[in-house]
């Protein structure tokens, strides 16, 4: 049900005090065909992507011997092997993979099998351009790379589902099988699909959403530029036009395609489940063009890929915090990372510095990862990724990263007993990630300032990194995730605030939580229109503000004041006045909106609703964001943060007796200091530690405390 504005006002005590039964809207089900059971991690996985179909079969025994030396305990196979399984349509054999799995089983190495839908063989699309993905310029993707087929095309789907069924029937109960991966990085190379097959699915999607075309016309305001439609079938996909499409249509098309990709994964899951009970995942990454949150319905555990260089290690922290929270209680996997240098035709990056790979593994395992896996085992002999590093060279010798892989294994062996005993501690602060907000910000980039993140995920990551730098443990939680356990929730750049979301936030706040609605939040309606009853839609009343203007301050040098500091603000700004009971915490001091508030707070139940209506900018920006976070974290009763130099990441863990363990690592070149409570000792060497400890770059410690 849609919570109406009136109902919300009543519920928050702003309107006439009528008793009423509030109910949250439909949330994504956690778990689908299987109930997600409590999970006890047994070991740390050290894995690698393996392509036996590309090499002589007699190399397998040598590979396995090498893998054992390196402590590789899982291989992932099959994601691009469809043409080996089925070189001619209907002539299917999984014999090679069955033999490899037997050998892996004998060697104590588990296997993750991937469904091969990312690379259909030539016979599926040869002479059939209509089965291929088409981009917004009408360019049809050709066979030869990956992700060229349209998953909306019924014949493509049928062929994918048939090979998946055969694969699951034949290999789905093999004792070496420890998991399934659906597809591979779905929609990482392509965005929205404009094929006829996609458009044929677009119209029913709209019909289901709106029922009658009049409703769509009304919701999208289609008399603007005479877009008005008489039938759903007339609604175009957002192909190139002389100027821009209606924002509602652009955002809706992204959501349609992304939901479609997630549904395709879900359908794959259902097939696998008929023949195999092994847990299912997909190697995701926030950049891909699918509905990330909806995708979780298809998964038993989340996994992600990341290829950072030594300066980009923050992406491991962000993604670990996102994918850990995606399926609560179930550790995530890092499914792919580079042993050393990344590379593809026309590009290569420098090799990782000494020690970086093991440091990455400490971050990932420490932050709740069960697995740390490489792409790939043996350098490609052919294809488009010849320059990419691997554990072994194409000539089957240890590569430049081999010694680092050994180091990861030593690290894993040290961490394993501790991390099996100590699970990840729950976070009290979260930053919201919304797939809908992402689509909206791609349609309408809301801040055009130099140096400001242009992508939604980078805006979320910017807030996340401020929380991390302050030393707080944190989650990144999807829009529909439960707010359980949290004390502070920060929601940056979420233009549409749904009644369902607000309902959950309301309960959270009433019980003592503090919600910070960050810049841009509330500025658009569900169908990507401008709210017409208040500047921030439902948020105005919820937060006890009257939004007078929503005004772009980018490059205006506008100054504001809060927490005894004067600083620049930028981007779209909600210039507000308080309603009775609301406190102004920050004022705009210069420029066209001077004299209005940009930071407000309102008590609601035991908690607070805070609106930060504009983005602090310039040299003081980080300091101001941190001030806001710290102030409200303290008010919300969040546990005191860890005190550490920049670049030190501390992952708090806890065992079944409630005893804490920290995994701390310094990712920066400068030596850093970490303050410790009394009674700390190194969990591996047993050494007693004082009230602080120095960490050089990539130096890590697991630390226990006698309480
Ligand atoms: C990943 C992909 C792998 C390989 C790797 C190279 O995105 O899943 O198949 O291409 O990149 O870095």
Image (spheres, rainbow, N blue to C red):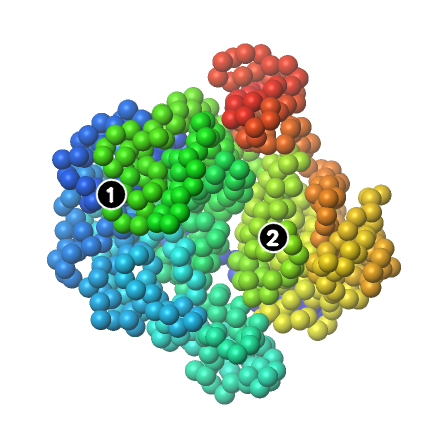
Outermost residue, top side: 687
Where disc 1 sits, the SS reads loop
Q: Which mark is residue 381?
A: 1
Residue at the image point whose x is 25% and y is 47% from the top: 382
Residue 473 lies left or right of residue 168; in this view the side is right
- Foreground label between 1 and 2: 1
- Tag 2 or tag 1, which sits nearer the N-term? 1
In the picture, measured across the screen, residue 85 lies left or right of residue 12, that is left
The image's mark for residue 238 is none
Relative height, residue 360 to residue 134 (above, below): above
* Towards the viewer: 17 or 407: 407
Circle 1 Cα neighbour tier, 10 Å, few/some/many (<14 / 14–19 / ≥20): some
- Ligand 1 within 8 angstroms of badge 2 C-beta: no
Category of crowding for the residue at label 2, using alpha-carbon neighbours closer than 10 angstroms: few (below 14), some (14–19), many (at least 20): some
- The quadrant of the image that shows the C terminus is top right
Horizontally, residue 174 falls left or right of residue 118, namely: left
User: Pointer 2: what residue?
Assistant: 453
């Amino acid at each position: 049900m849609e919570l109406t504005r009136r109902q919300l006002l009543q519920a928050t005590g702003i309107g006439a005090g009528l008793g009423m039964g509030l109910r949250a809207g439909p949330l994504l089900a956690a778990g689908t065909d299987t109930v997600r059971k409590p999970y006890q991690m047994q070991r740390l996985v050290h894995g690698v992507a393996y392509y036996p179909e590309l090499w002589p079969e007699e190399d397998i025994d040598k590979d396995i011997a090498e893998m054992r030396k390196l402590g590789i305990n899982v291989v992932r196979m099959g994601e691009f092997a469809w043409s080996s399984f089925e070189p001619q349509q209907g002539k299917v054999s999984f014999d090679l993979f069955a033999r490899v799995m037997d050998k892996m089983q004998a060697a104590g190495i588990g296997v993750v099998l991937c469904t091969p839908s990312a690379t259909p063989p030539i016979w599926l699309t040869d002479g059939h351009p209509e089965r291929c993905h088409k981009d917004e310029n009408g360019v049809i993707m050709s066979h030869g790379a990956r992700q060229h087929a349209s998953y909306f095309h019924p014949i493509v789907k049928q062929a994918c589902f048939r090979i998946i069924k055969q694969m699951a029937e034949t290999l789905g109960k093999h004792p070496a099988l420890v998991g399934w991966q659906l597809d591979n990085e779905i929609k990482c190379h392509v965005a929205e699909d404009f094929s006829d097959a996609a458009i044929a699915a677009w119209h029913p999607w709209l019909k289901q959403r709106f029922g009658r075309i009049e409703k769509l016309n009304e919701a999208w305001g289609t008399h603007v530029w005479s877009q008005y439609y008489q039938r759903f079938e007339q609604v175009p996909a957002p192909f190139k036009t002389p100027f821009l499409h209606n924002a509602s249509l652009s955002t809706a098309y992204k959501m349609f395609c992304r939901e479609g990709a997630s549904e395709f994964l879900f359908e794959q899951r259902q097939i696998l489940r008929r023949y195999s009970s092994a847990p299912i995942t997909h190697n995701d990454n926030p950049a891909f063009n699918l509905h990330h949150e909806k995708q979780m319905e298809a998964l038993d555990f989340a996994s992600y890929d990341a290829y950072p260089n030594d300066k980009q290690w923050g992406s491991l922290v962000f993604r670990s915090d996102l994918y850990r929270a995606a399926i609560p209680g179930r550790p995530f996997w890092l499914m792919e990372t580079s042993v050393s240098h990344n590379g593809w035709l026309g590009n290569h990056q420098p090799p990782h510095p000494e020690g970086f790979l093991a440091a990455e593994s400490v971050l990932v395992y420490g932050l709740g990862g069960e697995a740390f896996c490489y792409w790939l085992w043996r350098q490609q002999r052919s294809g488009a990724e010849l320059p990419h590093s691997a554990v072994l060279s194409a000539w089957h010798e240890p590569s430049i990263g081999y010694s680092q892989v050994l180091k990861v294994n030593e690290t894993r062996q040290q961490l394993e007993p501790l991390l099996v005993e100590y699970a990840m501690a729950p976070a009290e602060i979260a930053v919201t990630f919304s797939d809908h907000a992402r689509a909206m910000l791609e349609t309408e980039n809301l801040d055009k300032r130099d140096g400001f993140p242009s992508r939604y995920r980078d805006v979320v990551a910017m807030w996340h990194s401020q929380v991390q730098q302050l030393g707080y443990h944190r989650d990144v939680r999807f829009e529909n995730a439960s707010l359980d356990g949290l004390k502070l929730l920060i929601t940056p750049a979420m233009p549409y605030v749904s009644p369902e979301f607000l309902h959950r936030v309301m309960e959270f706040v009433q019980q003592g939580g503090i919600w910070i609605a960050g810049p841009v939040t509330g500025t658009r309606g569900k169908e990507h229109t401008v709210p017409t009853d208040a500047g921030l839609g439902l948020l105005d009343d919820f937060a006890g503000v009257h939004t007078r203007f929503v005004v772009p301050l980018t490059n205006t040098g506008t100054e504001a004041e809060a927490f005894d500091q004067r600083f620049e603000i930028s981007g779209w700004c909600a210039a507000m006045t308080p309603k009775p009971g609301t406190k102004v915490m920050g004022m705009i001091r210069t420029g066209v909106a001077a004299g209005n508030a940009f930071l407000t707070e309102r008590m609601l139940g035991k908690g607070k609703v805070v609106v930060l209506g504009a983005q602090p900018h310039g040299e003081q920006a980080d300091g101001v964001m941190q001030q806001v976070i710290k102030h409200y974290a303290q008010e919300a009763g969040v546990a005191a943060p860890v005190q550490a130099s920049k670049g030190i990441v501390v992952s708090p863990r806890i065992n079944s007796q409630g005893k804490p363990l920290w995994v701390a690592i310094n990712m920066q070149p400068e030596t850093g200091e970490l303050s410790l409570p009394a009674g700390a000792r190194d969990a591996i060497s047993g050494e007693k530690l004082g009230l602080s400890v120095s960490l050089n770059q990539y130096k890590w410690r697991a630390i226990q405390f006698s309480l």
